[in-house]
Image (spheres, rainbow, N blue to C red):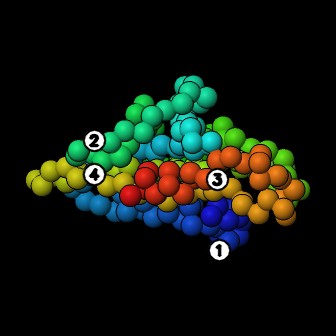
Amino acid sequence: MQGLPDPPCQRGIIPRAFEHVFESVQCAENTKFLVRASYLEIYNEDVRDLLGADTKQKLELKEHPEKGVYVKGLSMHTVHSVAQCERVMETGWKNRAVGYTLMNKDSSRSHSIFTISIEIYAVGTGLAVGRGWPAYAEPGSHFCQEGVSPLRSPENPMANWEKMTLTT
């Protein structure tokens, strides 16, 4: 999903999505944008804010009749460039739950969702809000290949349900 930084043709979908967002923002006329990012992790059915003041604090899923499903207390960070998006993502990435396996010394033990929220104010027409998930990372599930016992990974039974709830 991240790809390689060089050569540019090897960049992944995540940095390309960031580039697309900010290229679109720069080209728009008579329009103001507020671009914000959040990053959450689901680990053993617990939801954590990877960018919050206390990254170990468990957050709650809530449902609102108008907003739909959301995470109460999830921090949102204003970003003004591709570089800021990448720094925010890197900060959250460092806060993820990881464990050593035979295939990857920093194997993720969780599921995560990086969200970009864009508020657009077009002069004369008003405010519109859009939201997207350009980055979604999930752990490998090949326990035998990774040298991890399935007993070590209790996050798997509910992981798909949680992802569907948060991304619909």
Q: Earlier in the sequence, mark 1 or mark 3?
A: 1
Which of discs 1 and 3 lies nearer the camera? The answer is: 3
- Under mark 2, the amino acid is His
Question: Disc 4 or disc 1, which is closer to the eye?
Answer: 4
* Circle on res. 9: 1
* Residue 64 circle label: 2
Residue 93, visible in the rendered structure: no
Q: Name which of mark 4 and mark 2 comes first in the sequence.
A: 2
Of the image marks 1 and 2, the number of the one nearer the N terminus: 1
What amino acid is found at the position of numbered circle 3 in the picture?
Answer: Asn
Rendered-image quadrant of the N terminus:
bottom right
**Disc 3 target residue:** 156
Q: Amino acid at mark 1?
A: Cys
Residue 121 x, y percent position in the rendering: 22, 50
Can you tell which mark lies on residue 129?
4
Sequence-first tag of 4 and 1: 1
Distance of mark 4 from mark 1, alpha carbons?
Answer: 31 Å
Viewer-closest of 14 and 81: 14
Residue at 30% over, 48% down: 68
User: Which disc, if any, is residue 35?
Assistant: none
CA gap, disc 4 and disc 2: 17 Å
The reply to whether discs 4 and 1 touch (Cβ–Cβ < 8 Å) is no
- At which x and y percent is residue 46? 56, 38
Disc nearest the viewer among 3 and 2: 3
**Distance in Å between CA atoms under marks 1 and 3:** 34 Å
